[in-house]
Amino acid sequence: MSRMLAALLVGGALLVSACDKPVPPATPDKLSQTGGSKHGDFGPPQGEPVKAVLTSPPNVPPPTNRTKPAKVIVELEVIEKELPISEGVTYTFWTFGGTVPGSFIRVRQGDTVEFHLKNAPDSKMPHNIDLHGVTGPGGGAASSFTAPGHASRFTFKALNAGLYVYHCATAPVGMHVANGMYGLILIEPPQGLPKVDREFYVMQGDFYTVGKYREKGHQSFAMEKAIDENPTYVLFNGSEGALTGDRAMAAKTGETVRLYVGNGGPNLVSSFHVIGEIFDKVWYEGGTHFQENVQTTLIPAGGAAMMDFHVEVPGSYVIVDHSIFRAFNKGAIAILKAEGAEVKEIYSGKEVDEMYLGDRALPNLAAVETAARAQKAGALTVEEQMKAGQALFAGTCSTCHQGSGQGLPGVFPPLAKSDYFAKDPMRVVDVVMRGLSGPVKVNGEAYNSVMPPLAQLTDDEVANITTYVLNSWGNPGGRVTKGQVAKARVQPGGPTVAQH
């Protein structure tokens, strides 16, 4: 018993001795040492003031390549201007620098930024700016409230490295943001970011118009839709087609690409994804740390992320919000076109199929915009309708019915030399608007599939597509007008039930 007691006493003494020794603190990794505003003040600016290089999307300013803090002068002007939001559709955007998103700003951690905000004399509204990279109440908003024709100035020290959203914060804040008033400011860490071959600037935003998706003409802001969080458009860089067709981003195989991606909102969270690529690194939420081997990354409204990926295989890489109806029915599509030799051992496939990309695989839809202008002027010709209809057909109908109108045997009926439409050409309009279900016989062959109503199409788009179909592939010809479609749309009726 005495031996056991002695053993317990000795063991207890050892435990007490161990507890008396201080536990060494966990060693922070290199990245974490740059985190927090306490690590971002490197003293007063050194050298002559530097005027910031600002770029319009999708371009990115060059790295600062500085080793010491500087005084950086940023000059940004608010411009209210009418711009295309889709082919044949215009919208009055409120912008920082004349673009949506606004100009990209690039500084270094520890820099002192002297910010000059101007509001153009012809603006109708006062504006300001809230930069998420600013340490101070309002992020600069209270200090930058600027009436039309006036200019404001304030100064801040960039204490925290990262990629930050900026936006207007003048009431009603949601309306200013929804009209395109947002952009990105990159605050580089002192050592800079790892070098890459290409850098691009992309921002997602949701837009709320009185008219429906792709309804032609000038569209106004719809406050009720915005409050209900029911956007007409979800777009990259402020317009449908801003980063597709002849405006697609470009890279070469063997290069490393970096995307600086923000989400202006005002409402939706982005599920950002590049089809056919895996992000090698994602600096999630625009912060210091990165995750590797990421397929899709979430970017909240008012948030940002940086992502790197290496391009191995040539082709068209489609960028989407993977809340997928936003991509193919509201416009959230961009394309990065990679050129280079094929690498069969990595991927044996072919260029991304044109039908999968739809109209956004083609050059920008100039024919659609031309037809919209002619329609507005009352001078639309059948030839202009057919060119617009052909472009729209490629993105809306050709996957099932084929570019030749032959359909798929036993699955999708042909549109070419269709006796179904020859009996009543206005059937084309009815089927496009209301869909078609049940058994049907076309050119002597039986079909029994379902075509959903294409409710997203506007009256002039339906007219152009149907005019194209009626005048192609041996069909009887004819013309459908926007007025005829509008009249047919208000007539009662659900999905068309096939008759034979």
Image: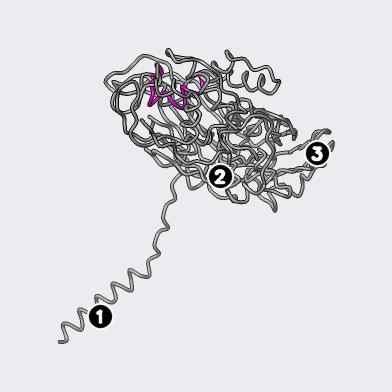
Mark nearest the camera among 1 and 2 is: 2
Residue that badge 1 annotates: 9
In the image, 64 versus 251, the foreground residue is 251
Q: Residue at x 28, y 77 (%)?
A: 12
Q: Earlier in the sequence, mark 1 or mark 2?
A: 1
Quadrant of the image containing the N terminus: bottom left
In the rendered view, does 288 fall on the left or right side of 408? right
Instruction: Determine the CA span between mark 1 and mark 3.
Output: 84 Å
Q: Secondary structure at mark 3?
A: loop
Q: Secondary structure at mark 1?
A: helix
Q: Earlier in the sequence, mark 3 or mark 2?
A: 3
Q: Which residues are magenta?
A: 390-405
In the image, 24 versus 266, the foreground residue is 266
Instruction: Determine the CA span between mark 1 and mark 2.
Output: 59 Å
Residue type beneath disc 2 = Gly
- Res 124 label: 3
Residue 199 in view here: yes
Residue that badge 2 annotates: 303
Q: Is residue 321 above or below residue 27?
A: above
Count residues near mark 2 (Cα–Cα under 10 Å), then give few for <14, some for 14-19, many for 20+: many
Q: Is residue 400 magenta?
A: yes
| Residue 229 image offset from top left, x and y in percent | 58, 48
Residue type beneath disc 1 = Leu
| Residue 252 image offset from top left, x and y in percent | 44, 18
Instruction: Determine the CA span between mark 3 and mark 2.
Output: 28 Å
Q: Residue at x 61, y 21 (%)?
A: 369
Mark nearest the camera among 3 and 2 is: 3
